[in-house]
């Protein structure tokens, strides 16, 4: 695309960016407090009760508003979603995407969705990312879901990332969603897709964003973890022990994460600590 002009049609008739809806905080005090049965307070060695590190609960939309703020000025964002099967991680990604599209914060979303035989995300199906260059969207925001043609076909994550970079470079704010981040990595946790690596390292200023989901936080490249906001749904003790040992999370916070109910998460924005809140995704 570069040097020859964009093969994607420019977005037409789009409202201005940044018109993000405001979500009101819950009115009832009891909704802001974590039930004791779900998140047990940490205790001192003497047995004296300490105040819980969780200060309240909030709707997921408040987290999405904070994390997507750079999109209003067409900067890229980098988000990592972690959570074991059944924790609500995929539902959370879908809710975030709905927020982004509803608020007109992106032009094009490419979703690499190959985990299950059935389609998990809403959007027009393509089998290769470059199909959008031969059959470009006519309306924006546009969402394209990359799916297998059959058992032995796999759409290329590298091609999807390259198209994301090219579209971003040509002025289309584009987001790549990798439902299974491992598809872009080697078995040893290095980047197999160099274009995915480039989005994490350079996407901020190239209108290129990435959301990647993974069950366990082990074996994730430091270029990704060091430059991304992290969203943790319920994790296994194995996963949180790794985070504690690697000094990425305190023992007290790890105890909160392993006890999160389905659909609830905590976030750690890039270069910031846990803000004290548990966020809740609406039931699908």
Image: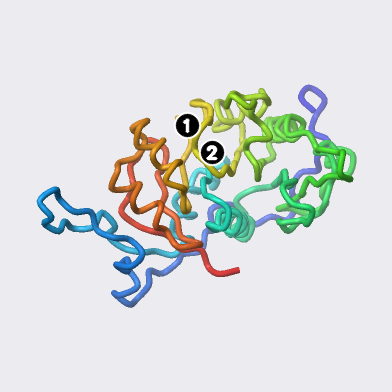
| Color theme of the render | rainbow
Q: Quadrant of the C terminus?
A: bottom right
> Neighbour class for label 1 at 10 Å: few (<14), some, many (≥20)?
some
Q: Can you say whether 86 is above or below 112 in the image?
A: below
Residue 247, quarter of the rendered image: top left
Q: What element carries label 1?
A: loop
Q: On residue 227, which mark appears?
A: 1
The reply to whether discs 1 and 2 touch (Cβ–Cβ < 8 Å) is yes
Q: What element carries label 2?
A: strand
Residue 279 horizontal side relative to residue 80, left or right: left
What residue is drawn where x is 74% and y is 51%?
A: 116
Question: Where residue 189 appears, x then y in whole percent?
Answer: 57, 27
Left or right: where 263 falls relative to 278: right
Q: Is residue 96 or residue 255 the one in the foreground?
A: 255
Q: Note whether residue 133 is visible.
A: yes
Disc nearer the start of the sequence (1/2):
2
Q: Tell me what residue is drawn at x 35 percent, y 32 percent.
A: 245
Name the side, left or right, on which 182 lies relative to 248: right
Where residue 72 sits: x, y (%)?
54, 47
* Residue named by callout 2: 78
Count neighbours of disc 2 (C-alpha within 10 A) and say few if under 14, some if 14 to 19, many if 20 or more: many
Q: Which is more toward the observer, 108 or 78?
A: 78
Residue 257 in picture, x, y percent from top left: 39, 51
Instruction: Count up the numbered dots.
Output: 2
């Amino acid at each position: 695309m570069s040097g020859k002009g964009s093969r994607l049609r420019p977005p037409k008739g789009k409202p201005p960016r940044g018109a993000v809806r405001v979500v009101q905080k819950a009115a009832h005090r009891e909704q802001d407090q974590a039930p004791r049965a779900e998140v047990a307070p940490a205790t001192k060695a003497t047995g004296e009760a300490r105040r819980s590190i969780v200060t309240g609960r909030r709707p997921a939309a408040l987290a999405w508003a904070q994390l997507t703020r750079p999109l209003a000025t067409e900067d890229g964002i980098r988000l990592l979603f972690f959570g074991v099967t059944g924790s609500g991680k995929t539902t959370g990604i879908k809710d975030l995407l709905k927020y982004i599209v509803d608020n007109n914060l992106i032009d094009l979303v490419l979703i690499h969705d190959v985990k299950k035989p059935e389609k998990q995300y809403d959007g027009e199906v393509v089998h290769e990312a470059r199909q959008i260059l031969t059959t470009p969207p006519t309306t924006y925001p546009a969402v394209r879901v990359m799916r297998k043609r059959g058992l032995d076909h796999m759409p290329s994550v590298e091609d999807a990332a390259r198209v994301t970079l090219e579209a971003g470079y040509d002025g289309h704010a584009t987001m790549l969603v990798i439902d299974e981040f491992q598809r872009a990595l080697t078995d040893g946790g290095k980047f197999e897709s160099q274009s995915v690596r480039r989005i994490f390292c350079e996407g901020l200023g190239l209108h290129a964003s990435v959301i990647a989901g993974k069950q366990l936080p082990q074996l994730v490249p430091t270029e990704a973890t060091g430059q991304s906001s992290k969203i943790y749904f319920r994790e296994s003790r194995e996963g949180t022990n790794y985070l504690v040992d690697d000094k990425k999370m305190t023992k007290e916070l790890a105890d909160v994460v392993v006890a999160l109910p389905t659909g609830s998460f905590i976030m750690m924005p890039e270069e910031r600590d846990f803000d004290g809140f548990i966020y809740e995704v609406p039931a699908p």
